[in-house]
Amino acid sequence: MEIVVKIDEIVFEYGGQPSDDGENIETPPNVALDGVSIAINKGEFVAVLGHNGSGKSTLAKHINGLLQPKEGMVWVKGIPTSDEEKTWEIRQSVGMVFQNPDNQIIATIVEEDVAFGPENLGVPPAEIRVRVDEALEAVGMTKFAGNPPHQLSGGQKQRVAIAGILAMRPDIIVMDESTAMLDPIGRREVMAVAKRLNSEGITIILITHYMDEAAQADRVVVMNGGKVVMEGVPADIFTQIDELKEIGLDVPQAVEIAHKLRLGGIDLPKGIVTGNQLVEALTNVNRN
Amino acid sequence: MSIEIKNLCHYYGKGSTFEKKALDEINLTIEKGDFVGLIGHTGSGKSTLVQHLNALIKPQSGNIIIDGEDINADKSRLKAIRTKVGLVFQYPEHQLFDMTVYKDVAFGPKNAGLSEEEVDERVKTSLEMVGIAPELHQKSPFELSGGQKRRVAIAGVLAMRPEILVLDEPAAGLDPRGRDEILGQVKLMHEKLGITVILVSHSMEDIARLVNRILVINGGKIALTGTPAEIFSKFDELEAIGLSSTQTAYIMRDLQAKGFNLPNNIFTVDEAVATILEVYLHE
């Protein structure tokens, strides 16, 4: 399998700013990433979990070179993010969608916003037209192409933000809590788009607080205190209920119900993560 | 401290070509001591509605009556009304501004002209209520974690001793532990102080385990009202207006569809576990 993002032993610190006289260190540095290594395969859907301040957003910003590690290296498609001449190439490969939809949309018309990226890349106008249409189609926003963005719902705005990235033809999309400010339907819309793009071959790295979203990923990475503390398929991660609660996280409700039913004496198989799996398992138990 | 809303309407951009009806003939009553959940998709009118409750927005038509008093009738009463109704906005930590946690929380009571002792007492009890330890009182609020900052901001509202507390998505953007801390404290305050709480949230799971009554708003109108059991069994109605029931409620519904004989009103984890165990233990 081809590795598209390789993160090797990276360390990153915030703060540690020298005082005005330039001599003393005013605040001690705050270690945000403490030796993180992750390899992400082409076409994978990876969810990154962790409480506020665990380092997940700092990690995300390393993937397209917005931040550079103090120690260690990050490669995107084999290019080190420290190579300044390749910064634009990397940012074209790795698109970022952030939390607040209102901070990411700049144009006054949806399709102009989507065109902003390719315009800046110097893509010829005819090609831009094609890319914008395809990108809006891919996120289901074609009929809003001529609308001003402020009339859209949060979920629709995030889909426009994703379209703006798609128009740059990325290989990887990093979603940094992109569903955190959305209502349930907005979350569902954005997750559906992410999953569809993933099925078409785009690698998705989803940073989230929502356990039900992480449960849909191929692989889950759990961060705590700037380190990767767990890594595996959702079924393996979410069965470690006590460990997750210990670091301030949660499990999907289906997992919690399954866990408590097992404690109550119902013999359920391991690895139940979603509601459908739980319903299926309970149906089978009943038949025995 | 009951709240009565009568025929409330509000338009944004009234008279312009962008005129949008944000609230459309809202009529409702909230009883003293209620813990009410207000749900609706983005843009449904939730925030516009709650901003009317302490006269931040004045009704373009209709009335807001709190404890028998029309809050917009007499301008000189506004200060007293805003003390009664504490409003915690979305991302309230953006409103922190003072040098220390203590001073930030003291700002409101000081401006209300209270004595130094009274201010001190209120600051300390409010911070204790939101679970901020005394050793953090002299820290800059900007050195705190996201969840702590938000609790300090809520303490600033509590220090005004509101009888009605309105929280607009207090857990948005927090991790599960931060969320449980804030909501746990809100529940505790509701139980201990008997204040009326109105909670705006996108999390059906949080609403399900906290409130005793739900108001569903859609397109500026009250679409549904009822107990959590009544509301969360209306899957189709909720989905039609961009909401959903709880994860647990869907599991229970799917089990029913598979032929399990289960009651209709289960929407929290613990209830689900108890009911499923009972069904299994009886077989």
Image: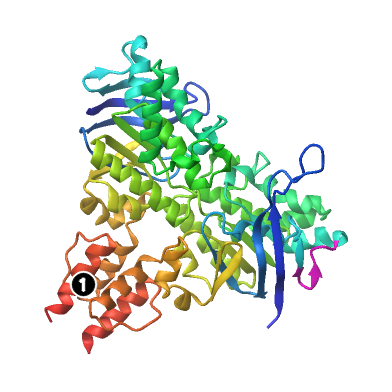
> Which part of the image, by quadrant, shows the N terminus of chain B?
top left
Q: Point out residue A264 in the picture as x, y percentages from the top left corner.
A: 23, 76
Chain designation of label 1 = B
Q: Nearer the viewer, residue A65 or B51?
A: A65
Q: Residue at x 26, y 22 (%)?
A: B65
In which image quadrant can residue B244 be found? bottom left
Quickly name the residue at label 1.
B276
> What are the residue bounds of the magenta stretch?
A73-83
Q: Residue furthest right?
A: A85
In which image quadrant can residue A140 be found? bottom right
Q: Point out residue A277 in the picture as x, y percentages from the top left corner.
A: 36, 77
Q: Point out residue A153 in the picture as x, y percentages from the top left corner.
A: 50, 45
> Which part of the image, by quadrant, shows the C terminus of chain B?
bottom left
Residue B22 visible here: no
Q: Residue at x 68, y 83 (%)?
A: A1
Secondary structure under the numbered disc 1 in the rendered image: helix
